[in-house]
Image (cartoon, helix red, strand yellow):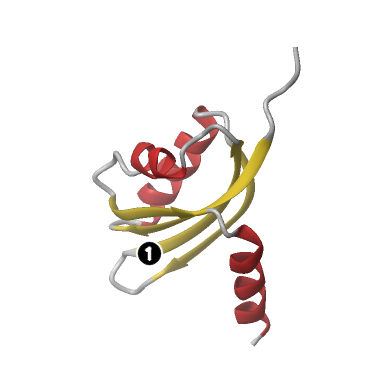
């Protein structure tokens, strides 16, 4: 049996609690069988945070469904996904270099 083709998606999340949100995002991504490509967390002084995660998912996985599945915890304010990985990785690297 051939393995299903994979693609990368970018998940952006606003978290109510940096530790709890990061742990839940990563735990769910692993439990759903997604491969972690990158993870960036920016914590704020008020305890909230933003996370950007690049995951490899089956090509048949709907990006909006992935966002819905990852947003099920109370520690999530907002979760969205994008499939323009090349552009977002480039922008992230440019921002990090600046």
Residue 92, placed above or below residue 60: below
**Can you give x and y, in whole percent of width and height, for residue 8 in the image?**
62, 47
Please indicate whether residue 47 sits to the left or right of residue 60 in the image.
left
**Can you give x and y, in whole percent of width and height, for residue 85 in the image?**
61, 58
Q: Residue at x 51, y 34 (%)?
A: 61
Residue nearest the viewer, comparing 57 with 43: 57
Q: Mark 1 points at which residue?
A: 49
Badge 1: few (under 14), some or many (20 or more) residues near its Cα, within 10 Å?
A: many
Q: Residue at x 64, y 87 (%)?
A: 98
Furthest residue in direction bottom, as rendered = 98
Residue 85, placed above or below residue 66: below
The N terminus appears in which quarter of the rendering? top right
Q: Quadrant of residue 59?
A: top right
**Can you give x and y, in whole percent of width and height, for residue 30 in the image?**
54, 33
Residue nearest the viewer, comparing 18 with 3: 3
Furthest residue in direction right, as rendered = 2
Q: Which residue is drawn at 75% across and 18% down?
A: 2
Furthest residue in direction top, as rendered = 1
Residue 55, placed above or below residue 40: above
- Say how many tags the image has: 1
Q: Residue at x 31, y 65 (%)?
A: 47
Residue 5, placed above or below residue 78: above
Element on which disc 1 rests: strand
Furthest residue in direction left, as rendered = 74
């Amino acid at each position: 049996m051939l393995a299903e083709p994979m693609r990368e998606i970018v998940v952006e999340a606003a978290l109510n609690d940096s530790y709890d949100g990061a742990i839940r995002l990563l735990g769910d991504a692993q439990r759903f069988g997604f491969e972690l490509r990158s993870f960036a967390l920016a914590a704020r002084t008020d305890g909230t945070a933003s996370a950007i995660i690049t995951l490899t998912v089956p090509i048949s996985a709907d990006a909006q469904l992935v966002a819905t599945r990852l947003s099920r915890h109370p520690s999530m304010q907002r979760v969205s996904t994008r499939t323009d990985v090349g552009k977002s990785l480039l922008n992230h690297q440019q921002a990090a270099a600046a």
